[in-house]
Image: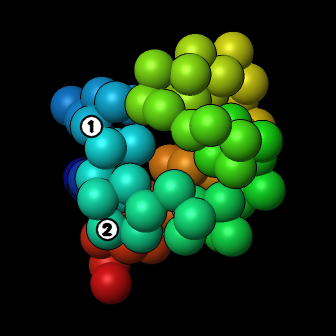
Amino acid sequence: MTQSPKNPLHGITLEAILTLLVAKLGWDGLAQRIDIRCFKSDPSIKSSLTFLRKTPWAREKVEALYIQTLKG
């Protein structure tokens, strides 16, 4: 029986992902890597979470950046 690779997002909330990315990259760094207005214009965790929860393509980009950042 083969085992699938462990999901690095398992058990991590979107808020935790966003908080870590902001701590490592800052809002400017996030805006440079992912072109989303909520990262550029008056950014906050709350407004970004609201947008990301409603926008699957943006959430996927943030999750991919998180995984890439972990691999470092």
Residue furthest toward the bottom? 72
Residue type at the position of mark 2:
Lys
Residue tagged by mark 2?
24
Name the foreground residue: 19 vs 41. 41
* Quarter that holds the C terminus: bottom left
Displayed quadrant of residue 68: bottom left
Residue 40 appears at what percent x and percent y? 70, 49
Question: Does dot 2 land on a helix, a strand or a loop?
Answer: helix
Compared across the picture, whether 43 is left or right of 37 comes to: left
Residue 13 appears at what percent x and percent y? 30, 28
Name the foreground residue: 49 vs 4. 49
Residue 9 appears at what percent x and percent y? 33, 43
Measuring 32% from the left and 79% from the top, which residue is drawn there?
71
- Does any portion of residue 3 appear in the rendered image? yes
Residue tagged by mark 1?
16
Residue type at the position of mark 1:
Ala
